[in-house]
Image: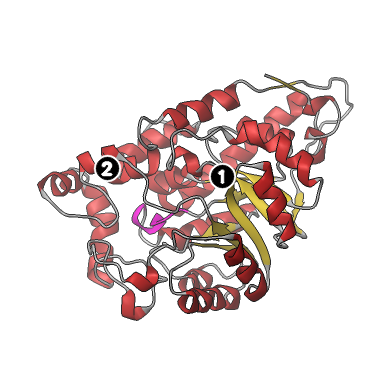
Amino acid sequence: MPMLLNASDYRRRARRFLPRGLFEYIDRGSEDETALTRLRASLDAITLLPAVLTGRDRRDLDTVLFGRRLAAPLVVAPTALAGLVSHDGETKLARAASRVGIPVCISTQSVTTVETIRRGAPDALLWFQLYVWRDRALTARLLERASACGCDNLLVTVDTPVSPKREYNERNGFGIPFKPHLRSMLDVSLHPSWLFGVLARYLVSEGMPTYGHYPEAFRTAITRADIAESVRIEPRLSWDDMCWLREIWPGKLTIKGVLAVEDAERAVEIGADGVVVSVHGGRNLDCLPAPADCIPAIVGAVKGRLTILADSGVRRGTDVLKYLALGAEAVLLGRLPLWGLASGGEAGAEAILRMVLREMDTAMAFLGAHCVPALRNGRASELRN
C-alpha cells in the first residue's frame, strides 16, 4: 500500500474509501468553486523571510490559547456528520486530538452526541460549535449540555444563513437530508468498505444515523427531509443574538465566519473572546475574499482585544505558519482530519495531525523561528505577496 506522505496522499485514499457523494460534500466548494481557487492562490502567494544563524536547534510549538496551554496552535474544526466518514468518527477525532494535545470542536450537526464523545474521550479538550436554532429555549438547553460536558469555548457559526448552492451534490445524489435513489445507492454499493465498515455498523447497532444533538422529539434520520421548524437553523441572526449567547454561555465565546473589520470590532463590543476569520472552507459563497486578505486588517483593528483564529484552505504545515505570521493565534483544520479519518480511522486522524506538526517544525527550522511568537516578531514574520 502506498505511503501517505502529504495531504494529497490522504485525500486520494479518502476518495477511494468514501462514496463519491460524501467525498464531494466534504471536498468541494459552492457554485463555480472559484473560492477554492482563491483560497489556494492566496496562501501560495505568501512567502516567509527566514532568519539565519540563530544558534538554535529546537523548536517549540506550544502556545497559549484562551488561557490554556496547548501542544500546538491547532484546533480540529467542527464538521457536520464526521461520524459518516468513519463509524463513531467524532469520538475518534476527539481521541486523536487529545493525544496530539490540541482541542477538537464538536458540531451541532454531529452524528454522535457531546455526552457520548465525552465518555469516549474523557481527556479531550472539547469545544462546541453552535448553529442557533429557531427555538431559543431548545438552543439554550443544548448549550447547557455542552457546558456540562466540559466544553469551555463556544464557536457560533454566523456565515451560513441559508443552504449553499452545491450543484455537484444535486447531480451526484448526495445532500442533507440524504435522498436515496438509484444513482446514490449505486455509488454506495461501489464502496463496500464504507458500506459495511460505517453505514452497516450504524444500521445494526442504532439504525440510520441522525443528528445526535437534536432533541428526541425532533430527531430524524439523515434520510428524512422534514426538519421540524423548531430546530431549523435561524436565518435571521443578529448581534442581539450574540449578546444573548454572551449572557447565557459561561465559557469563552468565539464568533466563526468573520471577514470584515467592522464585524470584528462589534464582536469586541458585545464581549466576545475571539473570532474565526473563515470562508467556511470555500463551501458557502463563491465570491468571498480569502481569509489571508482579511486577517492583517482585523488584527490591526482589534489590537489584542480578541483572540484571532483562522481556517480555510490549509493543506500543509506551511499554510498554518502563514496564517500565524499574518496574525492569527491558532488555525482550525477541517478537511485534513477527515481525510485522515477516512484513510485509517482514529490512527489515520492522529497521523495526519502529526504530519502537519512535522511540516510546521521543519519549516520553522528553515525560518529560524524557535517558537510560535517568533513567526509574528522579527524577520521570520515578514511577508511578500
Residue 60 seen in render? no
Q: In the figure, residue 246 lies in which quadrant?
A: bottom right
Residue in the foreground of this view, choosing between 46 and 158: 158
Check the picture and name the quadrant holding the N terminus: top left
Confirm or deny contact between disc 1 and disc 2 (CB under 8 A).
Answer: no
Q: Residue at x 76, y 48 (%)?
A: 62
Query: Of tags 1 and 2, which is closer to the observer?
Result: 2
Q: In the figure, residue 43 lies in which quadrant?
A: top right
Q: In the figure, residue 220 lies in which quadrant?
A: bottom left
Give the side of residue 206 with respect to residue 355, left or right: left
Residue 65 seen in render? yes
How far is the residue under mark 1 from the one under mark 2? 28 Å
Highlighted magenta segment, given as a residue range:
79-85
Question: Residue 81: horizontal and vertical position, in percent?
Answer: 38, 57
Q: How many numbered discs?
A: 2
Q: Mark 1 highlights which residue? A: 353
Q: How packed is label 1: few (under 14 Cα within 10 Å), some, or many (20 or more)?
A: many
Q: Is residue 347 above or below residue 320?
A: below
Check the picture and name the quadrant holding the C terminus: top right
Residue in the foreground of this view, choosing between 109 and 192: 109
Give the side of residue 324 with respect to residue 199, left or right: right
Specify whether residue 364 is painted magenta.
no
Q: Is residue 224 above or below residue 315?
A: below
Residue type marked 1: Leu
Residue type marked 2: Asn
Give the side of residue 382 with respect to residue 22, left or right: right
Question: Residue 137: horizontal and vertical position, in percent?
Answer: 49, 79
For marks 1 and 2 on the same chain, the one whose residue lies earlier in the sequence:
2
Question: Residue 138: horizontal and vertical position, in percent?
Answer: 46, 77
Q: Mark 2 highlights which residue? A: 169
Dot 2: element: helix
